[in-house]
Image (cartoon, rainbow, N blue to C red):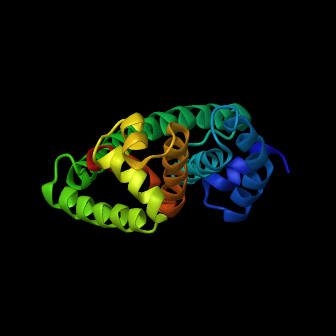
Amino acid sequence: MDANSLISRIKVGDRKAFGSLFRIYRPILTSYAMLFMKNEWAEDVVQDVFFNLWQHRENLDAEGSIHGYLLRSTYNTSINYLSKRKHDIKYRSWYQQRIDEIAFDVYDPSTNDIIRKIYSEDLHRQIEHAILQLPPKCREVFCMSYIDDMQNKQIAKMLGISVSTVENHIYSALKRLREMLKDNHIAILLFLAEFL
């Protein structure tokens, strides 16, 4: 059946003729729309084109080129669709950004005293617990170095050990602490500077 005869039947509300036209042109128009946009958007555009054609079927020209009409409709609908999507994406992006900013402000320890206190106390307990798990000599050297802020030479002299032994204890302590606190290592590292 030729396109003109399908159009004549569609004009009077023949759904079967409309279905035939849809089956013929859907793959062509979808491929055409995919030149501009994603596959799933192209499908939406083509459905919109055919929905619009059905809604305004009485205005169709049975003598005109349905092929040209459908291509032009697909092009115009694609442009409108992309323009609307771009606007929606911009709006959603701005809206999501505002939500994120508000959430970040609420949960930011530098602006929320309650959050800072909760995390500080929790991290403080975790660090103290981890330090207590160190072997005694290792813990002693680590505390002298990081908590009492003593130089390696001073620690070596005070404990009667070599500077390299002090360095080994510090290295060992840091390695063990890193392992014990690995689940919270980013927060711990940020907090460790203040704690120590």
Evaluate whether residue 96 shows in this view: no
Residue at 25 percent of width and 55 percent of height: 107
* Residue 32: x %, y % from top left: 72, 35
Evaluate whether residue 93 shows in this view: yes
Q: Which residue lies furthest to the right in this view?
A: 1
Q: Nearer the viewer, residue 105 or 177?
A: 177
Can you say whether 89 is above or below 131 in the image? above
The answer to which quarter of the image holds residue 15 is bottom right
The answer to which quarter of the image holds residue 65 is top right
* Residue 125: x %, y % from top left: 30, 67
- Name the side, left or right, on which 145 lies relative to 136: left
Q: Which of 169 and 102 is in front in this view?
A: 169
Residue at 46 percent of width and 59 percent of height: 137
Q: Residue furthest front?
A: 160
Residue at 49 percent of width and 54 percent of height: 173
- Name the side, left or right, on which 33 lies relative to 175: right
